[in-house]
Image (cartoon, rainbow, N blue to C red):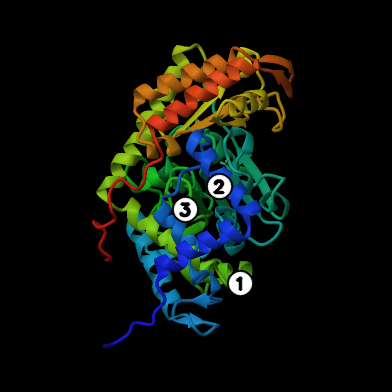
């Protein structure tokens, strides 16, 4: 009889968890507490999500042990036979999900993915144009607090009076400052983005266009937001928000993948490959790449379309419920998963609202609103998102209950200063219990169907 001496992977992982619990109860206790926290609170931080356990499992795989600088078929280390297969799978799945011609799955974060793109087409001191952080852009789109605003000369466009992206201002700034790179994409903007308009602005001034779809990547895959892949020269995203996948970043290129880049020699695809490795990173995290592969297969299934639809339905119901209670919702609604609410108009600072709500199991984050008079550490608004609620299979009617609870907390806060407040312990305990019951009624679920519909191209 032939014996199979291969170690049994599921047993290997189960044994690892058992040992962690037994040998390091201090650490395991904290990890377990975090697991229970997530189960018993409503996470509505728009940049958060709930990754499927099968993708989380990939993050814990022994693939972590392999040092694999370079790319599949061209590594600087031996022992990469299966690592190459995993990375190729992730690349193919990313290309397939977004209709891309090129994908690099190695960036550890979306921030580094953006930096790779910037350094691919800009030299230090050259000009970029991105969306102001205060208007809903991202730190890496030219904020002085980040490398993007310190190494490059950055200009920012903002919003119109009705709180929509001011494309005319972006165009005027592009004509005036002739940036070599224009960045579009947002973190706290609840409306659709006109990629074609941005590309025409970029073409007019001979700039490259980077679309950062970190917040809306799942809606893009599901066809609920236009896809920038063939409008932008580069499309970046993280993989752990709306792709319900491993934690990390992704860079993709559509029809421009073989366009010659700024040095007149290498194509854009070749430029990005070299800038990810060796310019920015050494060996990638192959376990995260496996987790990305798992999530990218899931979002390409028909079942995911229903999740994405639910994300938007819940968000629109949430916005409506706030407006029904008299809150000012920025832009008067939402097209995506994000709802930004002005709480200062109710006399509460964003940071007090965030902390008091978290005390009650309602996890949102403070956020500046357009033309905010308060600094980022205080803010006049809160930002909510529905990625995590959709995975709990909540219904629009549940959003009314959520807003009832949020309203109960916000109207009970006694604001002592912009950064301090009082909240009656009885009320806190009552709301926390209501949230816990909601969480039990709508437990965190797994991917809605096994990922069997996916077939590699
Ligand atoms: N960009 C930050 C946010 O949107 O919250 C982190 O991903």
Cα distance in 3D space between marks 1 and 3: 20 Å
Q: Is mark 1 within 8 Å of ligand 1?
A: no
Number of marks in the rendered image: 3
Left or right, 155 with respect to 227, comes to: right
Q: Position of residue 68 (x, y in %)?
A: 53, 76
Judging from the image, what secondary structure is the residue with disc 3 in? loop
Cα distance in 3D space between marks 3 and 2: 24 Å
Left or right, 258 with respect to 380, comes to: left
- The residue that appears at 36% across and 31% down in the rendered structure is 394
Q: Farthest right residue? A: 417
The earlier-in-sequence mark between 1 and 2 is 2
Q: Which residue matches tag 3? A: 239
Most foreground residue, 308 or 259:
308
The earlier-in-sequence mark between 3 and 2 is 2
Q: Which residue matches tag 2? A: 32
Q: Which residue matches tag 1? A: 282
The reply to whether residue 178 is in sight is no
Residue 271 vertical placement versus 314 (above, below): below
The reply to whether residue 80 is in sight is yes
């Amino acid at each position: 009889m032939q014996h199979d001496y291969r170690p049994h992977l599921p047993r290997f992982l189960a044994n690892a968890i058992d040992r962690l619990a037994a040998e390091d109860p201090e650490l395991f206790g904290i990890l377990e507490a975090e697991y229970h926290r997530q189960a018993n609170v409503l996470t509505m931080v728009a940049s958060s999500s709930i990754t499927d356990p099968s993708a989380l499992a990939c993050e814990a795989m022994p693939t972590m042990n392999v040092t694999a600088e370079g790319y599949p078929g061209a590594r600087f280390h031996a022992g990469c036979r299966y690592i190459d297969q995993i990375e190729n799978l992730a690349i193919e799945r990313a290309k397939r999900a977004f209709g891309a011609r090129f994908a690099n799955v190695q960036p550890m974060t979306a921030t580094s993915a953006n930096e790779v793109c910037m350094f691919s087409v800009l030299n230090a001191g050259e000009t970029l144009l991105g969306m102001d952080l205060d208007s809903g852009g991202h730190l890496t789109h030219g904020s002085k607090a980040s490398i993007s605003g310190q190494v490059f000369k950055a200009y920012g466009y903002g919003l119109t009076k009705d709180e929509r992206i001011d494309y005319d201002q972006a165009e005027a700034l592009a004509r005036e400052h002739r940036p070599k790179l224009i960045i579009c994409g947002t973190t706290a903007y609840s409306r659709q983005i006109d990629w074609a308009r941005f590309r025409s602005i970029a073409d007019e001034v001979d700039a490259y266009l980077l679309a950062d779809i970190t917040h809306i990547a799942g809606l893009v895959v599901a066809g609920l937001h236009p896809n920038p892949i063939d409008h932008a020269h580069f499309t970046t995203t993280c993989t752990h928000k709306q792709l319900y996948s491993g934690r990390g970043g992704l860079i993709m290129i559509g029809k421009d993948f073989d366009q010659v880049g700024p040095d007149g020699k290498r194509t854009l695809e070749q430029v990005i490959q070299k800038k990810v490795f060796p310019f920015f990173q050494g060996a990638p995290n192959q376990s995260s790449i496996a987790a990305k592969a798992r999530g990218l297969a899931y979002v390409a299934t028909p079942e995911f379309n229903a999740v994405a639809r639910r994300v938007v339905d819940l968000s629109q119901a949430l916005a409506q419920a706030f407006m029904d209670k008299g809150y000012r919702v920025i832009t008067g609604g939402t097209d995506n998963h994000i709802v930004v609410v002005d709480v200062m108009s109710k006399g509460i600072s964003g940071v007090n609202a965030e902390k008091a709500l978290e005390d009650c199991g309602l996890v949102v984050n403070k956020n500046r609103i357009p033309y905010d008079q308060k600094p980022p550490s205080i803010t006049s608004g809160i930002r909510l998102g529905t990625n995590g609620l959709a995975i709990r299979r909540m219904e629009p009617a549940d959003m009314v209950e959520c807003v009832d609870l949020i309203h109960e907390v916000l109207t009970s806060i006694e604001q002592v200063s912009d950064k301090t407040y009082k909240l009656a312990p009885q009320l806190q305990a009552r709301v926390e219990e209501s949230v816990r019951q909601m969480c039990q009624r709508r437990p965190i679920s797994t991917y809605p169907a096994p990922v069997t519909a996916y077939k590699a191209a």
